[in-house]
Amino acid sequence: MSASLKNTTALRTLRQPTDALSPSILRTKFTYFDIEWQHEKRWITEAKRVVHDEYAQYEEAAAEAEIAEATQEEDNEAGTDSDTTLDLLQQARKRRQRVAASTASTRGKKRARVTSDLDQFIARTNKADGDVDDPLEWWIRHAPDYPVLSKMAFDLFSCPAMSAECERVFSQTKKVITDERNRLDSGTVAAIECQKHLLRTGLLL
């Protein structure tokens, strides 16, 4: 496979979940892919697989974070109990409270996982989503509704849609690293380019 074809494939793989997380596109439940790629059915199947596989990674990371947080809370409670001498009745009451809290938490998580963030987002039928011009701004507002899926959306929508701007900045650095300034490290060059951009856009006065 040529380098060009590999790059094209990689870009399409990135675009699939990004397109899928655009509220205006997802309002039609993957119909966008069915229409745009009707000449390549395998692309449609692959697009749906990529979206679900990508989301599964974020869901797994969120589950691991929950377990780590719960473990930390248990350790903190155990430390508190060890510092305080409890009689047998208090110890028994404490254990019952922990069991009840753990059971309620587990039931709540099981109910929540019956329908994932991705499933809820796909099932969304709000007509106003079709008029969304800025998907990233939409996700900022709806992050509490989709705590796991929003993290995936932020990561994907933070990527530039095209590399032209990045390449332009890279090309400009040759004017910064002259023969007399050939010992500048990467951090210094990056800082200079960032400052130029901030000055040019008026964000830095």
Image: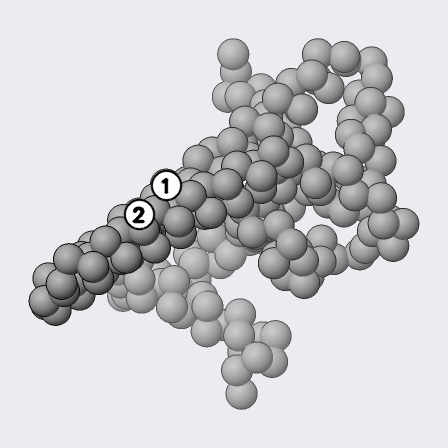
Name the foreground residue: 127 vs 158.
127
The percent position of residue 179, horizontal first and vertical second, equals 29, 60
Q: At x 65% / y 54%, what residue is drawn?
A: 145
Residue 172, x across and y down, in percent: 49, 58
Residue visible at 85% across and 44% down in the picture:
125
Q: What residue is shown at x 57% (from left), y 79% (from top)?
A: 203
Vertical relation: 36 (above or below) 197: above
Q: Which residue is most to the front?
A: 89
The residue that disc 2 covers is 68
Q: Nearer the viewer, residue 10 or 89?
A: 89
Q: Are marks 1 and 2 in contact (CB under 8 Å)?
A: yes
Amino acid identity at mark 2: Ala
How many C-alpha atoms fall within 10 Å of the one at disc 1: few (<14), some, or many (≥20)? few
Q: Residue at x 39, y 49 (%)?
A: 100
Alpha carbon separation for disc pair 1 and 2: 6 Å
Residue 58 visible to the viewer: no
Residue 26 visible to the viewer: yes
- Which residue occupies the foreground of this view, 62 or 44? 62
Q: Position of residue 20 (x, y in %)?
A: 70, 37
Numbered mark located on residue 113 in the image? none
Residue under numbered circle 1:
64
